[in-house]
Image (cartoon, coloured by chain):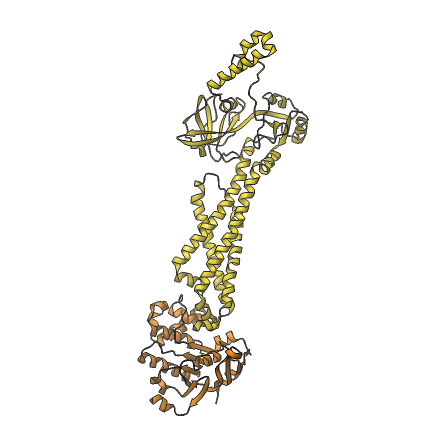
Chain colours: A orange, B yellow
Amino acid sequence: MELAIQTKGLTKIYGSGNTEVVAMKDASMDVAVGEVIALLGPSGSGKSTFLTAVGLINPPTSGQVMIGGQLVLDGAVAKTRLRTFRRKHIGFVFQKSNLIPFLSAVENVMVLLELDGYTSRAARKRAMELLDYLGVADRASNLPSMLSGGQQQRVAVARAIANHPNVILADEPTAALDSHRGRQVMELFAKVAHEQGAGVIVVTHDHRALDIFDRIYEMEDGHMTEQQDAGVIAGS
Amino acid sequence: MNLAAKDIRHNPGRFALTAIGVGMLLMIVMGMGGIYRGIIDDAVLLIDSVDADLWIVQRDTRGPMAEVSRVPRNLVHRALAVPGVESSREFVHHTIQRERNDQPLRIAVLGLSWPTDKGEWIPLVAGRPIAQNHYEMIADKSLGLALGEQLPLGKDIYTVVGLTQNMIGTGGDGVAFFTVADAQAVQFDTPGEAIRLEREARVARGAESETGTLQPLLLERAALPGSELPPLGPPQISAVVVKVLPGADVHEVAETISAWGDVSVFTHKQQQDLVLRGPVEKARKQIGLFRVLLTVIAAIIMALILYTLTLDKIQSIALLKLIGAPNRVILGMILQQAMLLGVFGYGIAWLLGQRLFPLFPRRVIITNQDLVQLAFAVAVISLLASLLGIWKAMQVTPNQALD
């Protein structure tokens, strides 16, 4: 089985001595290519810490992160240029759409593509295709402030998948969406994972769309466990 | 994609206002440079216009442009007798202040050596040179006098027959040309009562002296007008200006004249240097220092503006870092904005200056060299000013995109 993401014993400790807080303890996860993983857990359980560690934003105190079979983080030590690696291999979607406010919808997608070497014309073409695919092509020239929450989130999804990343990390991407739109976004992640061969991890509280995921992990007090009976959780 | 331009486009009003503010600041920097240049130009303008090879002035003075200088009128004839001298003429220069329409009117009075000098060399923009020995004047436009206007000065009325432009004295006052006789009449105008009192005083002094007692006729003559008293010479002039013959050695002529015990002599260049190192020096230094201060203040203000603009974009910068934008993209955005701000500010400064500088009371001369220098300075200021914003941007972590 080809792995898109592999984490081994990720631990994140903030502070030291009396003020030491263990945010994540020995979190390990394998995500196969084309697999969609849900990560559940209450607030403060360490989900976002795990996601930012895998996303190479907030390195762990110890443990390893491998992406596409390549060791990228060994503890806090970067084994490659993280920013470049993020650009080429990881797509992010967050609870807030996190669009650049002074760029239009299409430019928000284009900026990533141009950073990745696309010409302006090619980047615009690809961005428009994605916006069309996500149903927001008619708002391509609008600034984020002129888009609804759902539209902003779809533009963020378009940016996350624009350069065919190996990994898509989404942190509560449907929090600002109604259930219909939320499910659409989840289905989109599944579709992208299957069609592009990306590994997808979605942190979510939304139990209504759990049937879409291939596997479900849960975190509590920094500890990660895989739920063996995803169907039960989805049903609940 | 040019992120700097996109950010500006997103909020053009803010950028425009900022650019106008920076522009006005740069306009003042530009203006101070122009005033500095204007003072230097004004200081030597008269010396250049008179176009004399040599200036003969009172011994141990620095000439009429720098201080009071008094030489006898017959010095003109002595100078003319020196081998190598082509022509010599009287030079009278002083500044007066009168009231006109309830406003102060300051005039740099310059005497023309009538009839040899009628002011044909003066660059007129309207009217004609002086055509008679009395009651005509050529005025600079900055004095606000119109062609044909009559101006009472002392006991006489003078008609403006010609107009010049930008003929300014070393003190920044507009120059008015009169004949030497009229210039002195204006300078030594004394009220009738003062003349009568002086005559009475003269008689009283005579009566108390032994000479007056022994020769009573002298007392009678003491009460006559000064012009009828042979021992009282005519009013002195400020200097004598000399042109040497073509091919004659200026320094040789100067050496001959400087051997006389009652005068000092300066070449054209020396006279220029004396003015620049004398009355103009302090103003020049003051404006120069003020200009440097303004440039530093402009740099600090620009730095603060760019820092604030960067603070406004912290989230976007964090997001750019998150999606993998290299530092050069982020630095480029801040630097380009700084440069655009500098370019627009500079353009606004130039445009505003074109409209406002002519309204200044003193000449503001902006040379191409000064414009290029300021452009270079603005580029450096923009670069330095962006450093604070760049430093802030470098402190931003991708994590901040998630806040």
Indicate whether A1 appears above or below A91.
below
Q: Image point 56% across, 43% down: which residue?
A: B285
Indicate whether A37 appears above or below B153.
below
Question: Image check: B223 left or right of A146?
Answer: right
Quick one: B396 or A101, which is closer to the camera?
B396
Q: Image point 55% across, 46% down: which residue?
A: B289
What x and y, as percent, mark residue B41?
Answer: 53, 38
What x and y, as percent, mark residue B227?
Answer: 53, 15
Residue B253 shows up from this direction: yes
The image quadrant that residue B46 belongs to is: top right
Indicate whether A69 appears above or below B87.
below
What x and y, as percent, mark residue B286?
Answer: 54, 43
What x and y, as percent, mark residue B24?
Answer: 44, 50
Q: Residue furthest bottom?
A: A229
Q: Image point 42% across, 30% down: which residue?
A: B145
Quick one: B63 or B344, which is closer to the camera?
B63
